């Protein structure tokens, strides 16, 4: 079983829709949770970062972590064609030696104009 | 411009022919890492380096070598490439003292081993 599971999609929505992207993880030691966005033919870039449980909002994007159910979500409001990309969740524990991230496999999102 | 550069961007080679993919960053980052990205498997870490002359294995290090002789460079070496190393490779860097979660990725190198 992978430590981080993510539905690969593809997911296609009309412009203006609310998008929900999700990951589940198995390691209860994971404390830090991230969402990276990867445009076609580009490297991933950090989009959202949260620590432990709770919500974090940045413009049209909201990241949500539920540690009790080991569930990570990214919500995109008023989605735009420029949001079309692959979204990867990532997580790590707080161990000082484990400075590496565990990534989900990514969800490909297309927002249709 | 702050960036991570990789060369080459595309490479087609044959089994057993040694190759090196270069990675360079101009942000004075201590931490550098190599990943491979395969469909359905996501990003998997190959090797990482916390500083000059300090490297460690990631999740999938077999068949790869790295070196960190200078802070800005972190080349990935495939001594004897095999077809199962056909993949999209990313180099990344980050500040060690800060959140290494904020990794800056290069544009990727698409490698095909025939």
Image (cartoon, coloured by chain):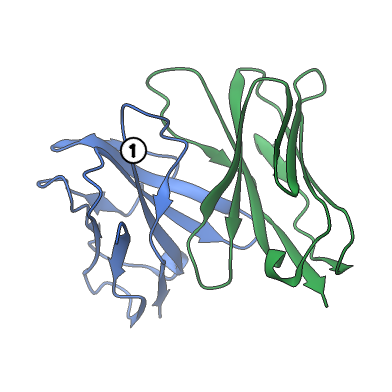
Chain colours: A green, B blue
Q: Is residue B78 above or below residue A100?
A: below
Q: Is residue B77 above or below residue A46?
A: below
The residue that appears at 77% across and 69% down in the rendered structure is: A110
The residue that appears at 42% across and 44% down in the rendered structure is: B103
The residue that appears at 44% across and 45% down in the rendered structure is: B45
Instruction: Provide residue A71's location: percent of width, then percent of height.
Output: 78, 31
The residue that appears at 22% across and 52% down in the rendered structure is: B74
Q: Is residue B85 visible?
A: yes
Residue A89 image-quadrant placement: top right
Give the residue at mark 1.
Answer: B57
Q: Looking at the image, which is closer to me, B29 or A60?
A: A60
Q: Is residue A102 above or below residue A36?
A: above
Instruction: Provide residue B99's location: percent of width, then percent of height.
Output: 42, 30
Q: Is residue A105 visible?
A: no
Q: Is residue A102 left or right of residue B15?
A: right
Q: Mark 1 falls on what kind of element?
A: strand
In the picture, the quarter occupied by the N terminus of chain B is bottom left
Instruction: Provide residue A86's location: percent of width, then percent of height.
Output: 66, 61
Instruction: Provide residue B10's location: percent of width, then percent of height.
Output: 37, 79
In the picture, the quarter occupied by the C terminus of chain B is bottom left
Residue A58 image-quadrant placement: top right
């Amino acid at each position: 079983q992978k430590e981080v599971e993510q539905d690969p999609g593809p997911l296609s929505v009309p412009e203006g829709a609310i998008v929900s992207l999700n990951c589940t993880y198995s390691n209860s030691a994971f404390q830090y949770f991230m969402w990276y966005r990867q445009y076609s033919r580009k490297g991933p870039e950090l989009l959202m970062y949260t620590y432990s449980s709770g919500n974090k909002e940045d413009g049209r994007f909201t990241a949500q972590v539920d540690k009790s159910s080991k569930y990570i979500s990214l919500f995109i409001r008023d989605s735009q064609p420029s949001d079309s990309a692959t979204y990867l969740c990532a997580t790590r524990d707080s161990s000082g030696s484990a400075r590496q991230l565990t990534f989900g496999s990514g969800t490909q999102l297309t927002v249709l104009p | 411009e702050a960036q991570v550069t990789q060369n080459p961007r595309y490479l087609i080679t044959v089994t057993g022919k040694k190759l090196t993919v270069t990675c360079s960053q101009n942000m004075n980052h201590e931490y550098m890492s190599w990943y491979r990205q395969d469909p359905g498997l996501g990003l998997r870490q190959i090797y990482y380096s916390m500083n000059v002359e300090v490297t460690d294995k990631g999740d999938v290090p077999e068949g790869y070598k790295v070196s960190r002789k200078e802070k800005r460079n972190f080349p990935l070496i495939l001594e004897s490439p095999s077809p199962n190393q056909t993949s999209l490779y990313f180099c990344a860097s980050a500040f060690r003292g800060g959140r290494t979660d904020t990794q800056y990725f290069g544009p990727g190198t698409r490698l095909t081993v025939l």
